[in-house]
Image: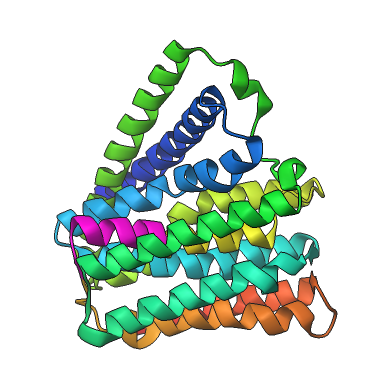
Amino acid sequence: MLGSILYVIIGLVLLVVGGEFLVRTSVALSFKLQLSKMVIGLTVVSFATSAPELLVSIQAALDGLSDMSLGNVIGSNIANIGLVLGITALIGPLAIDKDFYKFNWPVMVLLSLALYVFLNNDGVLSLLEGGILLASLVTYLYLLIKRARKSGGEEEVEEVDDALRQVSNFKIVIWLLIGAVALFYGAELLVDGAKEIAQSMGVSEGVIAVTLIAVGTSVPELAASVIAALKQEKAISLGNLIGSNIFNIASVLGITALIQPIEVKDAALIDVNIFWMLGFAIVLLPLAFIPKKMELSRPKGLLIFAAYCIFVALVFVK
């Protein structure tokens, strides 16, 4: 058991390191391809930050642990709202922009519902359904860039570091190698460790995936959000987390299903956990307007975080 926990910790550290190097590489490469800063922020950075979840899901699916790849995404989407957003709002109230309810929120809810329909239909996320999710992502990105250009959102993209314009080709190759190796071995260690923990605790891989792995792959977002909130920066936005949830469903599960169809083995994933994911997604709209409009206050943050704690407790009790 101790060895398995060590595997998981080392795996998570490698995923964080690998993800960071991949983001740097992607941004530096994008500058060399002369993409605008806005396009890099909305697409390249989002893809790169989803890389840990993607590799964990592919690795789990290839190992025949499809519940782990599905549980990872469902749990990550719940953790992004319940844990990351809840704690960030507790530190300081968050302003909500109009784009939230006009564009990002409806897309996240539609994709969440589509995932439920696909899984509830036959208990499998097939190659065709994976293709539909991926096509939805391409459409979303096209509309996202179009909307951002219309509103002249170049200055909004704070996560793109201008210093990466000057990086040499040699450095980019080294970063890419470090990122790829760290992500590959991180995913392998995390999946192996989590599988052994599940077996020794007598719980399903799905339970470990929606809790331990999901929180682990949400740690970078949580750290960045808490630091930004403590510094009273507006760098963390609801949009970033919702974007992450959209990418998790459309790119992580879409690509994984194209490589290996995802079969539901643990019924709790579609009978219980996916409803928690839908609940967390849907409840954000009333929270955005009641009682104070367009603000996620501390009491609202406490409510979301308390609901997340209840979710985790219920997962293990069941």
Q: Which residues are magenta?
A: 250-262
Q: In the rendered view, does 7 fall on the left or right side of 248?
A: left
Give the number of marks.
0
Give whichever of 176, 103 is nearer the camera: 103
Q: Residue furthest right?
A: 292
Residue at image point 76% right, 65% down: 97
| Quadrant of the snapshot with the C terminus | bottom left
Q: Is residue 110 magenta?
A: no
Quick check: can you spot residue 205? no
Dominant SS in magenta: helix
Residue at 76% x, 41% y: name it.
155
Specify whether 286 is left or right of 166.
Answer: right
Vertical placement of 318 versus 16: above or below? below
Quarter of the image containing the N terminus?
Answer: bottom left
Give the percent coordinates (x, y) of residue 123.
22, 81
User: In the displayed structure, would residue 225 be above or below residue 25?
Assistant: below
In the image, residue 270 lies at what x, y percent? Answer: 32, 83
Place of residue 269 in the rendered image (x, y in percent of width and height, measured from the top left)? 32, 79
Q: Residue at position x 79%, y 47% from top?
A: 233
Q: Position of residue 121 (x, y in %)?
A: 25, 86
Coloring applied to the structure: rainbow
Q: Residue at x 37, y 76 (%)?
A: 115
Q: Is residue 294 left or right of residue 223?
A: right
Q: Is residue 261 magenta?
A: yes
Res 62 → quadrant: bottom left
Relative to 206, 146 lies left or right: right
